Image (cartoon, rainbow, N blue to C red):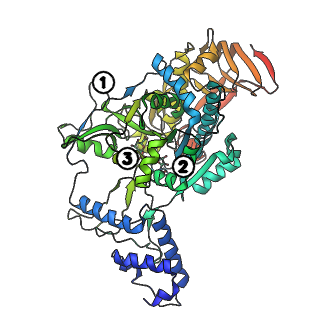
Amino acid sequence: RNNLSLLSSKQIDLAKMLLEMNQSHLFKHWPDPGVDDDKKLAFFEQVNRLDGSYPGGLASYIQTAKGLLADSKAGKNPFDGFTPSVPSGEVLTFGEDNFIQFEEAGVKEAQNAAFVLVAGGLGERLGYNGIKVALPSESTTDTCFLQRYIESILALQEASYRSTQGESKRDIPFVIMTSDDTHSRTLELLETNNYFGMKSKQVHLLKQEKVACLDDNDARLAVDSQNAFTIQTKPHGHGDVHALLYSSGLLKEWHDAGLRWVLFFQDTNGLLFKAIPASLGVSATKKYHVNSLAVPRKAKEAIGGITKLTHSDGRTMVINVEYNQLDPLLRASGYPDGDVNDETGFSPFPGNINQLILELGPYIEELTKTKGAIKEFVNPKYKDSTKTAFKSSTRLECMMQDYPKTLPPSARVGFTVMDAWLAYAPVKNNPEDAAKVPKGNPYHSATSGEMAIYKANSLVLRKAGVKVDDPVSQVFNGQEVEVWPRVTWKPDWALTFAEIKNKVSGKCSISQKSTMVINGRNIFVEDLSLDGALVIGCIDDAEVKVGGSVQNKGWAIENVDFKDALEPEKVRIRGFKIKKIEQLEKNFNEPGKFSLKP
Ligand code: UGB
């Protein structure tokens, strides 16, 4: 009370709110005016931030927390009354006729889309000290994830103009959600690389705020152990993206500009854009309000399961059930073995890869009601079975894929299953944890993420008629992986299967030891026999035919131990590096038509 004279009327209102919400402990140790006044004001700045960044304010956060903590203490099952079953969705196979048609439809729609990358997480499981989007997606060209994503969006934009004869040449907006942990490093990565070729005004960074930590079942806010004038905070989860997009005003801007789709994706999936054209085509053709991308899921794999939930009152929804909840849900509802593979060798529940395509109109309608608030959960670690005290403070969390939970039954919610080799290879696990993944399940490591890119490119070329040698099996950082020829290309060379078929012709072959790097839109591969390394590039105004027999010592793969401190972290976590011994390298930097036929 003595300190009231220090405060503005807004700060007094916040203080009253905290007292009403049973948070008087926050002020218990406050000294008289004149002592630590700057810290007291800083405290209110933080409270103001926490209040302003949460839909409904801090009072609503505390209220919700009390309810969820009471449910958690009572052991209430979040799926009470719901029975799970396997939903049916669109299942696509790469290269089949309907896949090609969906790709064509998706490319047309792409210039009506905005892309949103959630990149606020630090990826503690990976144990990498940098931001994950700066990590090379593969080490043949050292292209980081952010560059790969931006170049893919730009390639899609150009392909979309071409397919609609440039009816409306719209720049595709690209939003990156960052957090205090990733914001400045993400901005620096963009600025030092000239936004990887994208116009800087096309890119919007939205920073998520952390939320207050909770000390007990009464949702008393936790005070920082180092500073009694600071409330402890932790990340709230990727679900924040919806409230941030809503409050930024971008959704309305996009809607006014005639956009139709918002595509959400995550920080380390080097394959994703191979699946985007077809899945956007599915959304447009099936008129889905929500389309989640999925891949066949191995039981216990750390990706959620897309599940149909039917309530005893008749309501149904198709929703992600997170990987740690799927097994208990199944055991509690007539599947005594829980999360297990069926006779196909996979879980019957498609695996959620957290790539969501939302139709903008219905999305805005829903967010106008909810302000982007997503159903939250709390996961306290209790000291003992009485569940009266926590081992450490907890907080509410939310996930972006829970968006459909508040939708009315009339909403068109679907999903699209793609081949895992084509669509999903995240980099999440450190080498030690990856090596412990049950045999046959994906490692989700830097090693597997890179090898998956070479495999996908090789299989895509095979489908286009190229004779690509079988892979060999090798072990890196304790993980046995298939090593395919190291084939990479810039996204503007080819994004869809139709484009690949247009760029590759005649009798082509690539041996297992080979490396092929294609940097240029108008490079046509014809009757090429490659046994070694070929690096070829050209400017947009040049057209190059490459063929003949290329044979050299090529680029070798050398094992690296992840404990080898002499190697950089980005190399150690993948367990190998590329040794460039001999290659044929040629760049065509003048306009015109050329041919390279050694
Ligand atoms: N992220 C944020 O932007 N902010 C945050 O506060 C937290 C994360 P993880 P996890 O498809 O691969 C998700 O940690 O636990 C970003 C799905 O919930 O990689 O593996 C972060 O930067 C799960 O259903 O998520 O689980 C990253 O880009 C499954 O689909 C993204 O959010 C799985 O991913 C995901 O963060 C998957």
Front: mark 1 or 3: 3
- Element type at marker 1? loop
Residue found at x 24% / y 67%? 388
- Asked if one can make out residue 429 in the rendered structure from this viewpoint, the answer is no
Q: Tag 1: residue type?
A: Thr
Which is more foreground, mark 2 or mark 1?
A: 2
Ligand 1 is within 8 Å of the C-beta of the residue at disc 3: no
| Disc 2 residue crowd, few under 14, some 14–19, many 20+, Cα 10 Å | some
Between the C-alphas of marks 3 and 2, the distance is 22 Å
Residue 454 vertical position relative to residue 412 in the rendered view, above or below: above
- Point 49% across, 71% down: residue: 48
For the residues labelled 2 and 1, say whether their Cβ atoms are less than 8 Å apart: no
Query: Mark 3, residues whose alpha carbon is within 10 Å: few (<14), some, or many (≥20)?
Result: some
Quarter holding the C terminus is top right
Residue 209: % across, % down:
50, 60
Residue under label 1: 344
Q: Vertically, is 555 above or below 186?
A: above
What residue is disc 2 on?
Answer: 252
**In terms of sequence position, does the residue under pointer 2 or pointer 1 come before the other?**
2
Quick check: 333 left or right of 404?
A: left
Q: Nearer the viewer, residue 573 or 212?
A: 212
| Residue 560 image offset from top left, x and y in percent | 55, 38
Labelled disc at residue 402? 3
Give the percent coordinates (x, y) of residue 14: 44, 76
Tags 3 and 2 in contact by the CB under 8 Å rule? no
Which circle's residue, 1 or 3, is located before the other in the chain?
Answer: 1
